[in-house]
């Protein structure tokens, strides 16, 4: 889930100054509108507002609020005077982070409409939208911003990005996409810098809407202009999700070349993709790099993966060393089972028998009969025919218990072979004695 910390607000709350600045920039190329005629502010009210402003500047917010509340209903003011008093009250409440109080008084300003200067009305609507967002009054935030757009001169991208974020909080992803796309479009047309968090938000929204072509294109844009590890991993993950394994592998390899692998999962995922692509040598190199950097923990699972890659790459001796380390910390006997087979292939029969015994002791095996069979072969190669025969008998018994016809046949053949071999040795010894 993409949270607000990830998709940071593109339109920060800056109060009066920010809104006025945004409005001015938006209207640079707009035709001039007639100046709204409003009542003048009396010298007495102007003085009271100045005193309240001084208290706010000194961070004496409660004193400023009390002073303003003391005059707001003291006499009959014209609309402009009343609007300015409520505006100052709204700012005082905002300054002390009482957003509910701020909203209450800014609403009074907005209600004056033509009775206050147009700049104050537009600034107030913009501020109300932002404050409503902070207060999690999302529908109010949308309503105020829509009012602002109706009266603003040539509004830019900010209000659309803002409304997209509001819709995102409301989980209305369809309308969120419409607004953020519009904001990005306006910004591009005006030659403005496209912000990372806009594209990150769009990427999330497309993902939630399962619009995979646009999920991919925005993920590619994030990688191109803001090449962070998390964006590379996200793009690779998306390719995997839509069954484009080759593109997923290429993306992970590019991230690796760009030193973008940071977490254990990054290394193990790339190694896994290389194993699927039947490139075990490269998979082993990636695992070794992650282990050497201590990014990957040396646990049973990771060591087993590393050992498998080495084994399939033909590096048997290094694979054996890795499996020995993994087996020592394993809770079951599966890795010892693998080691027994490797020792058999490498003619290390003593170690083969020991590994098979450890596998049988720990249990949790894929096929217990197979372990008895390997153990029997290693004992036979040591000329321990009686012990080998006993191991093959155990193999046959286990195979019958699990209805494993293959090992019933194999182990029975070995038992017969050893009996004949033993009989031949006995006969030869008798003949030699004569």
Image (spheres, helix red, strand yellow):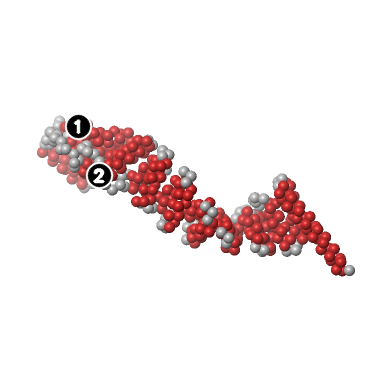
As drawn, 370 above or below 27: below
Which image quadrant for residue 358?
bottom right
Dot 1 crowding, Cα within 10 Å, few <14, some 14–19, many 20+: some
Q: In screen coordinates, is 287 left or right of 406?
A: left
The answer to which quarter of the image holds residue 351 is bottom right
- Does the image show residue 4? no
Percent of width and height locating residue 308: 57, 56
Quadrant containing the C terminus is bottom right
Q: Secondary structure at mark 2?
A: loop
Q: Is residue 201 left or right of residue 309?
A: left
What is the total number of numbered labels drawn onto the structure image? 2
Label 1 element class: helix
Q: Residues within 10 Å of mark 2 (few under 14, many from 20)?
A: few
Mark seen at residue 376: none
Above/below status of 63 relative to 333: above
Quadrant containing the N terminus is top left
In front of the other: 245 or 130: 245
Q: Which residue is mark 1?
A: 113
Q: Residue at x 43, y 55 (%)?
A: 254
Distance Cα–Cα, label 2 vs label 1: 31 Å
Residue occupying image coordinates x 18% and y 45%: 54
The front one of 141 and 85 is: 141
Q: Residue furthest bottom?
A: 433
Q: x and y percent of residue 322 in the render? A: 57, 60
Instruction: Please state which of residues 19 and 412 is positioned toward the viewer in this rendering.
Output: 412
The residue depicted at 48 percent of the width and 44 percent of the height is: 243
Q: Which residue is mark 2?
A: 190
- From the top left corner, tell me how far across and down residue 17 is, in percent: 22, 44
Residue 91: horizontal and vertical position, in percent?
A: 23, 41
């Amino acid at each position: 889930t993409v949270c607000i910390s990830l998709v940071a607000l593109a339109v920060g709350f800056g109060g009066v100054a920010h809104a006025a600045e945004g409005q001015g920039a938006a209207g640079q190329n707009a035709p001039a509108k007639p100046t709204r005629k409003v009542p003048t502010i009396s010298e007495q009210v102007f003085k009271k507002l100045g005193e309240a402003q001084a208290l706010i500047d000194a961070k004496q917010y409660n004193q400023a609020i009390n002073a303003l509340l003391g005059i707001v209903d003291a006499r009959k003011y014209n609309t402009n005077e009343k609007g300015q008093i409520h505006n100052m009250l709204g700012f005082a409440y905002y300054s002390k982070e009482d957003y509910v109080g701020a909203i209450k008084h800014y609403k009074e300003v907005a209600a004056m409409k033509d009775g206050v200067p147009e700049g104050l009305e537009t600034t107030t609507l913009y501020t109300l939208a932002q404050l409503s967002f902070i207060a999690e009054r999302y529908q109010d935030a949308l309503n105020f911003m829509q009012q602002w757009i109706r009266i603003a001169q040539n509004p830019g991208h900010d209000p659309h990005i803002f409304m997209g974020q509001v819709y995102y909080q409301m989980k209305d992803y369809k309308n969120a996409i419409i607004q953020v796309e519009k904001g990005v479009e306006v910004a591009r047309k005006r030659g403005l810098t496209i912000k990372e968090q806009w594209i990150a938000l769009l990427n999330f929204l497309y993902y939630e809407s399962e619009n995979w072509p646009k999920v991919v294109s925005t993920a590619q844009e994030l990688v191109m202009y803001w090449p962070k590890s998390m964006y590379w991993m996200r793009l690779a993950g998306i390719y995997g999700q839509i069954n484009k394994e080759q593109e997923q592998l290429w993306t992970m390899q590019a991230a690796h070349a760009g030193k973008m692998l940071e977490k254990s999962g990054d290394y193990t995922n790339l190694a896994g993709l290389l194993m699927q692509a039947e490139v075990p040598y490269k998979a082993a190199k990636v695992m070794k790099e992650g282990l050497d950097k201590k990014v990957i923990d040396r646990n049973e699972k990771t060591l087993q993966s590393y050992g498998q890659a080495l084994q399939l790459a033909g590096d048997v001796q290094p694979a054996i060393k890795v499996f020995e380390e993994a087996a020592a910390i394993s809770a079951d006997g599966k890795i010892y089972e693998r080691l027994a087979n490797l020792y058999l292939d490498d003619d290390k029969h003593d170690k083969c028998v020991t590994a098979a015994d450890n596998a049988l002791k720990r249990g949790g095996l894929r096929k217990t009969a197979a372990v008895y069979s390997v153990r029997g072969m290693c004992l036979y190669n040591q000329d321990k025919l009686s012990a080998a025969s006993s191991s093959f008998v155990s193999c046959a018994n286990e195979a019958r218990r699990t209805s494993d016809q293959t090992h019933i046949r194999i182990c029975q053949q070995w038992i017969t072979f050893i009996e004949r071999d033993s009989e031949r040795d006995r006969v030869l010894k008798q003949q030699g004695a004569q």
